[in-house]
Amino acid sequence: MSITTEEVKTITLTINGQRVSPKIGVTVLEAAQGAGIYIPTLCHHPSLPPYGGCRMCIVEIEGMRGFPTACTTPAEDKMVIKTDTSQLQELRRNILELILTEHPHTCLICDRKEQCKPYHICIQKVAVTTGCIMCPKNGRCELQKVVDYVGLKEVSLPYTYRELPILRDSPFFDRDYNLCILCGRCVRVCQEVRGAGAIAFTYRGSKALVGTAFDYTLQDAGCQFCGACVDTCPTGALVERSIKWEGKPEYIVTTTCPYCGVGCQLNLEVKKGRIISSVPALDGIPNRGQACVKGRFGITEFVHHPQRLTTPLIKQDGRFVEASWGEALNLVAEKLQRYKGEQFALISSAKITNEENYLAQKFTRAVMGTNNVDHCARLCHAPSIAALEQAFGSAAMTNPITEIGDTACAFVIGSNTTSGHPVIALEVKRAISKGARLIVANPREIKMCQWADVWLQHLPGSDVALLMGMMRVIMDEGLADLAFIEGHCENFDAFRESLKDFDLDFVEKVTSVHKANIEKAARLYATQKPATIIYAAGITQHVHGTDNVFAIANLAMLTGNIGKPSSGVNPLGGQNNLQGACDMGVLPNVYTGYQDFDNLDVQKKFEAAWGTKLSSVPGLTLPEMLDAVYKGDIKSIYLIGENPVLSEADASHVEEILKKLEFLVAQDIFLSESAQLAHVVLPAASFTEKDGTFTNTERRVQRIRKAIEPIGNSKPDWWIICEIAKRMGASGFDFGHPSEIMQEITRLDPHYSGITYQRLEKVGLQWPCPDEENPGTPVLHAGTFVRGKGRFTPLGYKLPAELPDKDYPLILTTGRSLYHYHTGTITRKVLGLNALEPEGVVEINPADARQLNIDDGDLVKVISRRGQVTTRAKVTNACLPAVVYMNFHFAESSANILTNPALDPVSKIPGFKVCAVRIEKE
Amino acid sequence: MFITKLVEIFNEYKGEKGAVIPILQKVQDKLGYLSQEVISEIAKFSRMSETEVFGVASFYAQFRFTRCGDHVIRVCLGTACHVSGGERILDEVTRELGVSPGETTEDYKFSLERVACLGCCALAPVMVVDKTVYTKMKLPKVRGVLQTYGENK
């Protein structure tokens, strides 16, 4: 790849006599800020387009009439600008005075504020309880800064206190509109950036206030509790409740969010050894200063939760007894000695770091002598790995997240993006606001349908038919990019042959989507370029998940939408480090960097690096491991940060299986449902307590940084693995810091070769990054596919493993909520998240509900061939008739007790998304 | 019921962008006021949030969010009416109806509003019921006027 450094064109202007040379296209404000010149602002925020509302940033520009606002005036060559003349300051003071007639301002202009301390009685404090240094925003308030700068000493206009009650309807923040200066930043970020529109300016004139329609609670108004309003508020009007009286943090540590695969950059605020808040980093890539409710408000509470495991536990007579690290590690090392080879398996986690995952598979292969190592990617993106490796030669998101906003057409299939990957949904929203078209394919009505040009509500499990139908339209109407196919792809004829089985009448019948809509979607996707495909577990978690991904790959190649900016095939990883865990080789069939273990050269390379003989017996996948335990072939499992009792299909069976183990070690931050079955429990440190790297879903390797000491006696996972290995007499586990482990990784994984901690300091790098000069690879398959030629795959229509019948007449499909994460081990410990969504429900169409005599909110039993759960019904038009929907986060009504463990033959993923159930009123 | 009326209006504006205000006006014409359900439907149709639609509607004085009475009483408190006792007329109406300005009686018979000037200052103080102007009002006349519109509370 050639690196072209783009010539950045600059202009030259004069600000306050200082010559400044900013990039072309910036505003006067940005030009000044770039040169370190302060211009006061209130309504301006870097995340938002210029607004020009508060008039604080007025400047004088030679040759221009009046006082233009710096934030809305484009900087031009040879401009002569003054920002601090006495006339400007006088005007600013006048404007500010008007603003302050409705904002308690004793804190701002008090002549004794330097001497003021908490609890000092003072007549000014008594008048209005929200003034003075008692304001929660004291020291961080932008109004204070502006008042200081313009030198306002007195407000001569009468002050009106709005006397509004403080609104506490959010579990995470308070709204005190007595302190609001109506700058509109919260409203704009909510409407323009987040696409939620939960708040707006209501009424006008002196009655104007920020609020919701009819004073609805925030939740009823569609608030997603992302906290963007809190982060943009310049005053104390919107304040995070948990830190309302904490004051400023002692220090801030930038790290990567541990929830989904987006990899948002967060600033952890630390005070007195505690994380007090997590705020999205303003210049963070890929999240551009945004986060979701989980990253913003769902971190501090779980990190400091009283149920965190703080000491090793050893089970004696069925009860856990506290133990020292020495005792626990010696016991584990001694026991594991007995289970070397095929009787052992390690289940790792896509939540822990790359370094730790690397060690986990090295431990399994080099110390335990088996390839039985796998992790939860098996349950979410194994089909993507299998299919995209075959079709393109590389299994990952082909394009960066930040490019999605520049696409001309987004096709979102099998992803409830606003819930599962909220920050990626913002990119889609950004594209739409720039005129892009949106196609949504989802059996259930999701928030994104509201923005869509076409919504294809297909039956669960009919994705291949739907996609092949679209491709049939594209072929028949001559919209395929034949030149691209000719030049870059192979096996096209066989694929075209297989399209013959998918005439639109047939497709309409199996998908239940109207022909006209399929045609419309096909035309949009094929003609609006660049077009991007975004998909998630709704595509992969099927017994023909690999075929689904093949269909998506075919569609992208057919229209040439790959290898170009803002196009591509983009699987969204559910876990923060799903990509990294796969890259590290926590998979039974590949070593680190997807190097085939049955390739003798590769095996020799790893044997040389690890200084030991390696097994050439193929390893077992996660579901196969569990089967092997059931049959008695595997006797010991080392479980790291994973909760199969809730996350596997047919979950009650999994619990039974784990109980059969002779020796189960669980390493986790909480005593999860699975850890309770363990013989030894090892307390791990959370992501805030260690260094390392995560690789997000767009292949970006990003740092996590230690912000606080490990809670209690917990230890980082990498340390624990090393200690066990060393106690078993293994060499190659002497690491003092994760950066040393990364050095070993870069020697073995050609994708990671150019990565060092130093290079990741500012912004993460997207692999492949073959050497230290390489800037990373944002777009995969540019020019040529990684495997040489993109391979088309002929496909046929296959039925789901389980179809509705007389006894089980409904199709159950599963998904995730915005407020909870995975098996809820973490999010259900966060009070606010639990308050927003306390329990699981089963969504059911009104037609089915009537037939079953079920009302909204009734307790119902959902029964499948595997088991039954009791939950509440939510009657909604979001589901098609005969389709019901559940989230899988809730242990007490675990959807995975119902789901079908039948596996995709290629990738061995269970078909979570389709199973047959019946519903009975309790 | 109201849904069919809404759909008729929506059909006129299908595919048009930025039609929220004319839609709000037409809907209020047909239904009298903008209820929560109505705002919710308009929001869905125009692909906005309910709060965004409400924000637009509440900016304009012409939109109402509560059901209006059968008869709208406007009592003038403009300069001329004010000096000739408009305030007392308003108090009397308030007492008779048991509602404050801006409110509607429980039986939805009357809505009471105070206005700034009706442009007939020579006849002050005045009150207007629907489209009928009552001039040179005196306290004892208030009950009589209200009674002509049916039972007062």
Image (cartoon, rainbow, N blue to C red):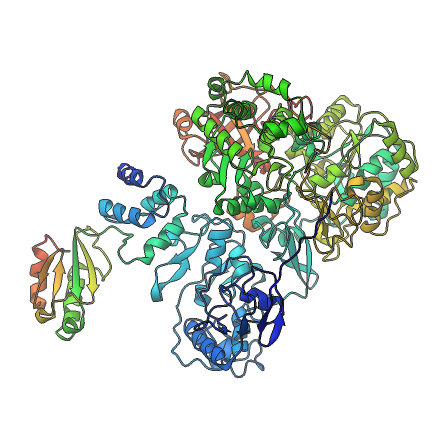
Q: What is the quadrant of the N terminus of chain A in the image? A: top right
Residue ID at (73%, 24%): A627
Left or right of A584 on screen, residue A541: left
Answer above or below: position of A100 versus A738: below
Rendered location of residue B93, percent (x, y): 15, 63
Q: Residue A340: in sight, yes or no? A: no
Residue B118 pos. (x, y %): 15, 65
Where residue A646 sits, quadrant-wise, is top right
Is A195 in front, or is B2? A195
Image vertical order of residue A161 relative to residue A406, above or below: below
Q: Of B44 and A778, which appears nearest the observer? A: A778
Residue A477: x %, y % from top left? 49, 24
Number of numbered discs visible in the structure rendering: 0
Percent x, y of residue A707: 72, 57
Seen from the viewer's position, the closer of residues A456 and A230 is: A456
Q: Nearer the viewer, residue B139 or A563?
A: A563
Is residue A308 in sight in this rendering? Answer: yes
> Would you identify the image quadrant in which residue A780 lies?
top right
Q: Is residue A780 left or right of residue A524?
A: right
Along the horizontal axis of the image, is A747 left or right of A858? right
Picture layout, residue A12 above or below residue A679? below
